[in-house]
């Protein structure tokens, strides 16, 4: 049975704004309080989805979450009508209102960890929504994320869904942003590589300046839940020094696809030994590893973070070639663009570069890889999923028209208390669930029906 990789991109939500909420993500904190354009942000994301669909790749859409999050505001002591809750929150704690209005679910690399059926003992695709407990504004996403994934992948003959890990620092889990899978055909067994920032029980020292968001304990728990074979599973520590330079997730310093690992020289602690372990485990599957390692002398960690060079997508095209998707910031940096151009012309596996303007997402600290969740499927599993989320020409037109109807082209902190913004956002999400065929996945839908 043939396999393929589907990329599921998150739609930017109607409350997209720059709140600087993500300590450790330097782009996020640097652009705090800049005026945002939610309409443009959503359009930029849709253009990337459509362009990859046009390359012959399988592309799907994940919806944004309900924001402002009124259930949490009420849980935290604000009361009365929806309008009263928003007014109280703005008056007493505007930063809290901003936090609970974040559109951060757009970065679906953090939505969940996904293991394909080829790697799981029970032969099903496994999903575990990330608890994202390092940041409050993200820690409230897991319940809706699980509901959305269950609405898309409903058939329990093919798909298994797990609760998010406990909301504890011991099990800090940031999803697929710290997870790689290496191998050949997507429908054949591969080697899963979990990258963690710190091991809470008797591990090596972690970062000192910025938090390590993924723990080894969380990665090990997910491997158990997903019924992965230890012989084909690797746990690697992210280099603490690069976390302290703003590399808050592994996907800011490394990206993989099939047999290729594109990474910085300082991506992993004890990197030569880590790569040797991956090679040994791939060899048991008669697979090889092709490492494209970028030296620190060629691209500094600071430049990698500033351009999001490694927060790129590596994609296998239908013709067998491999495309790298990078943000416009890479083309604007002479040294980074020279390196990318040489890589594409070298005769190696990556032979094509695609550049996208993702400014609205980049300013909030998320590049091409942050915006997508990778799901490896076989043909039967594709037939079993909800087809309404798959990008095509008609859906692209429909979603752009939907954005035009519901999204503002300017949003600031002061706008978040506007009751009309809440009504606009709920109307948008209610319509979107009908467009995508998801049913009632949002709290406001469930409380009103």
Image (spheres, rainbow, N blue to C red):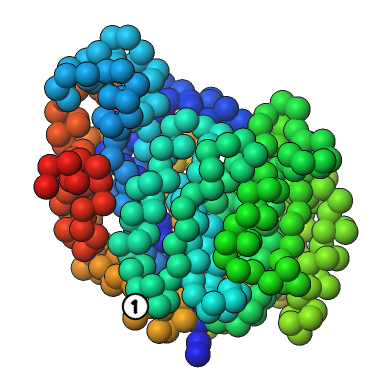
Q: Can residue 231 be seen in this view?
A: yes
In the displayed orientation, state which residue is furthest to the top: 92
Q: Is residue 161 above or below residue 386?
A: above
Secondary structure at badge 1 equals helix
Measuring 29% from the left and 70% from the top, which residue is drawn there? 386
Q: Can residue 31 be seen in this view?
A: no
Q: Mark 1 points at which residue?
A: 384
Measuring 34% from the left and 81% from the top, which residue is drawn there? 383
Can you give x and y, in whole percent of width and height, for residue 131 in the image?
Answer: 50, 44
Can you give x and y, in whole percent of width and height, for residue 372 in the image?
Answer: 46, 56
Q: In this view, does 100 lie above or below 435?
A: above
The answer to which of 134 and 167 lies nearer the viewer is 167
Q: In this view, does 90 lie above or below 331?
A: above
Q: Is residue 236 left or right of residue 117?
A: right
Can you give x and y, in whole percent of width and height, for residue 412 in the image?
Answer: 31, 23
Can you give x and y, in whole percent of width and height, for residue 218 in the image?
Answer: 63, 49
Q: In this view, does 37 lie to the left or right of 22?
A: left
Measuring 28% from the left and 24% from the top, which residue is drawn there? 74
The answer to which of 109 and 257 lies nearer the viewer is 109
Measuring 83% from the left and 73% from the top, which residue is drawn there? 280
Crowd band around label 1 with a 10 angstrom C-alpha radius: few (<14), some (14–19), many (20+): some
């Amino acid at each position: 049975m043939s396999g393929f990789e589907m990329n599921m991109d998150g739609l930017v939500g109607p409350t997209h704004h720059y709140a600087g909420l993500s300590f450790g993500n330097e782009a996020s904190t640097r652009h705090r309080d800049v005026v945002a354009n939610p309409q443009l942000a959503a359009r930029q994301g849709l253009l990337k989805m459509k362009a990859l669909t046009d390359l012959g790749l399988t592309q799907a859409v994940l919806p944004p979450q309900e924001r402002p999050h009124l259930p949490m505001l009420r849980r935290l002591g604000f009361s009365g009508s929806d309008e009263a809750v928003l007014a109280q929150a703005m008056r007493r704690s505007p930063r809290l209102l901003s936090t609970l209005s974040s559109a951060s679910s757009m970065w679906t690399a953090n939505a969940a960890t996904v293991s394909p059926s080829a790697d799981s003992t029970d032969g099903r695709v496994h999903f575990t929504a990330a608890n994202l407990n390092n940041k409050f504004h993200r820690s409230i996403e897991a319940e809706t994320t699980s509901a959305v994934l269950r609405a898309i992948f409903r058939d329990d003959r093919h798909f298994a869904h797990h609760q998010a890990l406990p909301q504890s620092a011991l099990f800090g889990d940031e999803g697929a942003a710290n997870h790689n899978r290496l191998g050949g055909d997507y429908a054949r067994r591969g080697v899963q590589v979990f990258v963690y920032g710190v091991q809470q029980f008797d591990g090596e020292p972690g970062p000192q300046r910025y938090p390590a968001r993924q723990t080894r304990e969380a990665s090990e728990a997910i491997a158990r839940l997903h019924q992965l074979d230890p012989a084909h599973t690797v746990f690697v520590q992210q280099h603490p020094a690069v976390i302290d330079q703003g590399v808050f997730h592994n996907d800011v310093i490394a990206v993989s696809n099939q047999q290729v690992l594109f990474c910085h020289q300082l991506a992993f602690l004890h990197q030569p030994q880590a790569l040797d372990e991956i090679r040994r485990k791939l060899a048991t599957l008669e697979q090889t590893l092709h490492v494209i390692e970028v030296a620190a002398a060629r691209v500094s960690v600071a430049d990698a973070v500033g351009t999001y060079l490694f927060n790129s997508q590596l994609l296998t095209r239908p013709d067998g070639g491999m495309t790298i998707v990078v943000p416009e910031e890479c083309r604007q940096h002479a040294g980074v663009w020279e390196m990318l151009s040489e890589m594409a012309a070298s005769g190696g596996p990556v032979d094509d570069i695609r550049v996208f303007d993702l400014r609205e997402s980049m300013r909030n600290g998320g590049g091409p890889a942050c915006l997508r969740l990778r799901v490896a499927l076989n043909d039967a599993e594709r037939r079993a999923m909800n087809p309404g989320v798959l990008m095509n020409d008609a859906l692209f037109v429909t979603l752009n028209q939907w954005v035009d109807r519901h999204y503002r082209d300017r949003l600031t902190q002061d706008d978040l208390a506007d009751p009309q913004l809440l009504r606009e956002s709920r109307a948008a999400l209610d319509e979107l669930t009908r467009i995508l065929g998801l049913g009632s996945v949002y709290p406001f839908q469930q409380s009103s029906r």
